[in-house]
Amino acid sequence: MKANKLISNSLISGLLPQAANNPRSRTHHNIHDSYNEKVQRFLNVIEYASYVRPHYHNEQDAWEGFIIIKGHLSILQFDHSGILVDRNELSPEGPLFGIELDSTFPHCITSLSDQAIVFEYKQGPYLPDNDKTFPQWAPTEQDTQVKIYHQWMKTAAVGERFKSDKISNSQ
């Protein structure tokens, strides 16, 4: 029998400082043993300041799921031109604490609390060279406008598009 994989207070306590000390303000912990597994499962610890660049997955019929464990998190979904088409806020208290979405459309997450911890799952295998595509309208982490864009993400309403002609999208 394989050993059980526990998601515990001690595991989470060890991940919190890793996220706080990471330059990207986040960390993850894989629950799956291999990137070849059919379902990838992991915890993601995201600080308020962490910018997760909007992206979409390249596999046909790709899906991705999120279940919030701690904190408050927004899941943003965009059309391919950058218009926000859906926004769902997750909290352990509800009313919404989980979502599975079509990840062939641009999407991202942003923490609305100091720290958010989310259980994520998606189809495998995970092939890092072909896993995701970043739309041109989504600023890179190095872009000079990324802080403004990230702050916009925190409150953006469905139907809005970030308005800036200054996004350099330097890769």
Image (cartoon, rainbow, N blue to C red):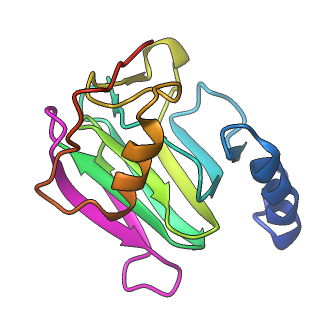
Q: How many marks?
A: 0
The boundaries of the magenta stretch are 79-100
- Can the viewer see residue 4? no
What residue is shown at x 38% (from left), y 29% (from top)?
139
Q: Position of residue 3 (x, y in %)?
A: 85, 52
Q: Is residue 112 above or below residue 165?
A: below
Q: Position of residue 34 (x, y in %)?
A: 68, 29
The answer to whether residue 116 is left or right of residue 3 is: left
What residue is shown at x 10% (from left), y 56% (from top)?
159
The answer to whether residue 89 is left or right of residue 137 is: right
Residue 92 is inside the magenta segment: yes
Residue 81 is inside the magenta segment: yes
Q: Position of residue 153 (x, y in %)?
A: 36, 54
Q: Position of residue 40 (x, y in %)?
A: 56, 40
Residue 22 in which image quadrant: top right
The answer to whether residue 14 is left or right of residue 79 is: right
Q: Is residue 145 above or below residue 12?
A: above
Of 144 and 81, nearer the camera is 144
What residue is shown at x 42% (from left), y 13% (from top)?
170
Of 29 and 79, nearer the camera is 79
What residue is shown at x 16% (from left), y 32% (from top)?
80
Residue 103 in which image quadrant: top left
The answer to whether residue 94 is left or right of residue 26 is: left
Q: Is residue 127 above or below residue 42?
A: above
- Can the viewer see residue 110? yes
Image quarter hosting the C terminus: top left
